[in-house]
Image (cartoon, coloured by chain):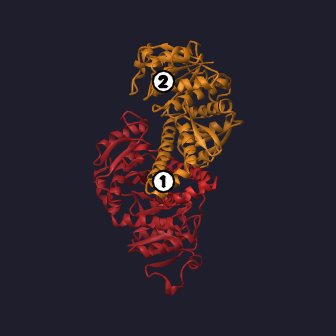
Chain colours: A red, B orange
Amino acid sequence: MVIAVDAMGGDCAPRAVVEGALRSAGALPVEIVLVGRPDQIEQYLPSPGRRPNNLRTVAADDVIPMASASPRRVLRRRNSSMFMAVDMVSSGEAQAVVSAGNSGALLALSHACLGVIEGLRRPGIAAPLITLQGPGVLIDAGANVDCQPIHLAQFGLMGSTYAQYALNIDNPRVGLLNIGAEPSKGTDLTRAAFELLSQAAINFIGNVEAEHIFNGDAQVVVSDGFVGNVTLKMTEAVAQFVMEELRRSSQKSLTTKLGTFLLRDGLRQLHERYDYATYGGALLLGVQGISVVGHGRSDAKAIANAISVAYHAVEGRVVGHLRETCGLLVGSPS
Amino acid sequence: MVIAVDAMGGDCAPRAVVEGALRSAGALPVEIVLVGRPDQIEQYLPSPGRRPNNLRTVAADDVIPMASASPRRVLRRRNSSMFMAVDMVSSGEAQAVVSAGNSGALLALSHACLGVIEGLRRPGIAAPLITLQGPGVLIDAGANVDCQPIHLAQFGLMGSTYAQYALNIDNPRVGLLNIGAEPSKGTDLTRAAFELLSQAAINFIGNVEAEHIFNGDAQVVVSDGFVGNVTLKMTEAVAQFVMEELRRSSQKSLTTKLGTFLLRDGLRQLHERYDYATYGGALLLGVQGISVVGHGRSDAKAIANAISVAYHAVEGRVVGHLRETCGLLVGSPS
């Protein structure tokens, strides 16, 4: 398995990306290709004799900026590290691409270069969720802000397939994010999507609210990209807020400092679990290849997490399974 | 000032409501009227000679159930505690009504009995927010799931007025909840609402994301009722999740138990601040009177908080100020 990594993508690139790729090369049975400016990548790599055998570099001179870039312009920048990394997947040289760069650009490039799986209307971003019962996934995390019911139904099918084959969840429970349990709750969109999801060949458990996400009732949470994006950012912000409040309390006296010290393992574990969910990397499901969108603020660990997400998706043959599911997709063109 | 309290509303009614009302009667310069079944209320009240002078009861035989009830049916139940409490406001006997009962029923009753302020298209629910810089408000927290741009613009105006006069925030910063800062971000709805909010006579700071809510950049956060409701429930669920994870960690050993003990003040404060925001009671803004929607799970403290929300709204003459603002409402019918 070959994973192409955009070495220039992210706020801390290329350093964090190179370091993360080195970790992954040591941990996973994959070949990692770092794509980017050779001189900038080289300075963070060990000397040639000491490099892992399963890591190599490919030169790309151009870099797509982190700030917003128009999709049309991005598609013309064929010498950019991101374009070349995506192109390795479309040419078959690699099975997955990972980038913590401009996420809009990565979506546009993945969509255009890899193409959409037949029968699917819109690819969706599957983002990892933490729950009290283990991993979960939310789809769509922001690729499609204005959705139709069929899009949400297809997100449910894709999320279910992903959870089953990449996260190894048997018969994953799929819920529709809503503001109440009854089928009649919510918007015109959610009511129509509820109908379609009920007919789909998945384990649809109905409408779910925030509490059902965190207690693990739903392992696949379906929403449009606007609500999904707000939800994920809210999760990140609340967790940070609570941690910050705790940090402030813990600094108040020697007593509280000692208390924090004694609780350090629990706090660290919590932080790690939450970090993984936030920075683990989201996946663009529905394109003909694996494309992982890393968090812009990714450090080396986050990059290694994102590469791991790509690895499990390829290993689980997620794209192949999605293609097979396409025949079953509700409302897909025949 | 008279505040009518639906003694029968909420999972822990009437006990929690009566106890909460007693607290408020001791703390605020108001007259509190408990509306409900006399025999059930009496058992939680002190003996007649020991009751506070500013608390009295009004008999109502019927109770609107917590589970969903159709608005039409609710409007016919004139002997219900909720109907009678709302009616006290419409007749001028009370200035505010507080109920932790069926929130859909309270919205329908407040809307129908109190009437909507002239020029306003739709009342919206203003819910309290916690931020690192102090109190804030989110509007709409769930009254309107399918919104038009003008509704969001009016929510911004109402939220700003409420924050200024009830929360005493000078020139409150109003933000539109979105998935990015640029005006072009989001849905057709948010883009059009951005335009209208920019023209409104408020301190509109543009689009905001989750992190801007918690760091206090925006003191008034505007969204449609679907996104607002999901956002609030997400806040509650994440905070509960983090607390639950901490609780689990803290039970692991004597060391961690000691750590938790030493941090107890900070943890309690955090819990209280978050509790207040969650259970403090949301306000239906835009009707001709003050109507406070308590959390269904309200305990005595939450009821007292909700009464306090009502008190500050009446004290700040929020309804009067909203009426004055109506002339300035963008897109209001002339």
Disc 1: CA contacts within 10 A as few (<14), some (14-19) or many (>=20):
some
Q: Quadrant of the N terminus of chain A?
A: bottom left
Which residue is identified by label 1? B257
Chain name for mark 1: B
Residue A47 visible in the displayed image:
yes
Compared with B254, A87 (above or below) is below
User: CB of mark 1 within 8 Å of CB of mark 2?
Assistant: no
Which residue is identified by label 2? B106
Is A290 in front, or is B321? B321
Q: Is residue A242 left or right of residue A228?
A: right
Residues marked 1 and 2, same chain: yes
x%, y% of residue B293?
A: 51, 28
Residue kind at label 1, given as amino acid type: Lys
**Quarter of the image where one finds residue A296:** bottom right
Give the residue at x 50% y 16%.
B47
Compared with B265, B111 (above or below) is above
x%, y% of residue A94?
A: 41, 71
Residue kind at label 2, given as amino acid type: Leu
For the view shown, which residue lies furthest in the right direction? B170
Is B177 in front, or is B189? B177
Chain name for mark 2: B
x%, y% of residue A277?
A: 46, 57
Task: Please tell me which of labels 1 and 2 falls first in the chain.
Answer: 2
**Quarter of the image where one finds residue B252:** bottom left
Compared with A49, B93 (above or below) is above
Disc 2: CA contacts within 10 A as few (<14), some (14-19) or many (>=20):
many
Give how far apart the Cα atoms at labels 1 and 2 are.
43 Å
